Image (cartoon, helix red, strand yellow):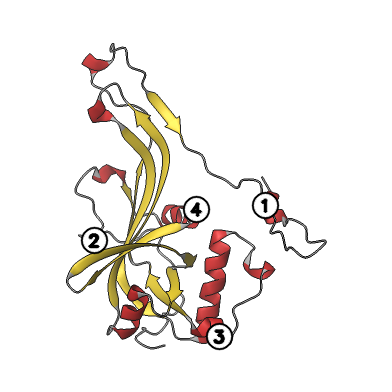
Amino acid sequence: MQGTPEAEPETTTPAAYTPSDRTVPTRSPDRASYDKELVHAILDEGHVCHLGFVRDGAPVVLPTLYGRVGERLYVHGSTGSRPLRMTGQADPGLPVCLTVTHVDALILARSAFHHSMNYRSVVVHGTAYDVTDPEEKRAALDALVDHVVPGRAADSRPANKKELAATAVIRLDLNEVSAKMRTGGVNDEPEDLALPHWAGVVPLNKGYGTPVADPELAPGTEVPAYLTAP
């Protein structure tokens, strides 16, 4: 694979990522975690990541879909997409920062200063590589589809040669990684507790709505179970 290190032999996988200068937060470091199971869970629950890189000396951050396969993240796009084109041209790869965030609740405090959010986030630093191996590319695209809706890759036509040629995929290994979370309720100052302002936690929920079938759906095609399961 062009510009890609050889695959490492299977060994006992550590339960946590090793902290680095870039993954230890300067603010609220007690909220940081390097636990792999937690990092994977946060990544697997998300749909959109933000991919940051530098182009012509200026920072660029783009929202995009992603998928995880083990200790690797994959991002895809048009072969004309800037970050994907730059990754293919870079040697040995493109330095990037990728982030995923979930907002679980709004924290409304009595004081404006102490308003906050409960959240879960992951930050990944590393080098993105262009995926050129056909088998890895197909597996990555299946993972991207299944990441959006689990089970969907097997229930759709795979990309043909023309579509594969028009699609670029980049890979980012999960090496320099950290998670950060906030949980709990309001942290008002003791002198503000008697103020006549409502305070508390407003949970934010997400999930599938009722599927709306395409008007040209083939007769007899039922809504798949993976879209209706609770």
First of labels 4, 2 by sequence position:
2
Q: Which residue is labeled 2 in the image?
A: 20
User: Front-most of 166 and 110?
Assistant: 166
Question: Would residue 184 appear left or right of 147 to someone viewing this image?
Answer: left
163 horizontally vs 31: left or right: right
Task: Classify 10 Å Cα crowding around label 2: few (below 14), some (14-19), many (20 and above).
Answer: few
- Report the residue at 70% width, 55% height from top: 213
Q: Quadrant of residue 123?
A: bottom left
Quarter of the rendering occupied by the C terminus:
top right
Compute the Cα span from label 3 to label 1.
29 Å
Image coordinates for residue 192, horizontal then vertical, percent: 24, 16
Indicate which label's residue lies in the foreground, 1 or 4. Answer: 1
What amino acid does circle 4 point to? Glu
Q: Amino acid at mark 1?
A: Val
| Identity of the residue drawn at 81% across and 63% down | 219
Residue at the right extreme of this rendering: 220
* Dot 3 or dot 4, earlier in sequence: 4
* Residue 63 picture quarter: bottom left
Element assignment for label 4: helix
Looking at the rendered structure, the kind of residue marked 2 is Ser
With respect to residue 77, does 204 lie above or below?
A: above
Q: Which mark is residue 212?
A: 1
**Disc on res. 45:** 4
Q: Residues within 10 Å of mark 1 (few under 14, many from 20)?
A: few
Distance CA(mark 1)–CA(mark 4): 23 Å
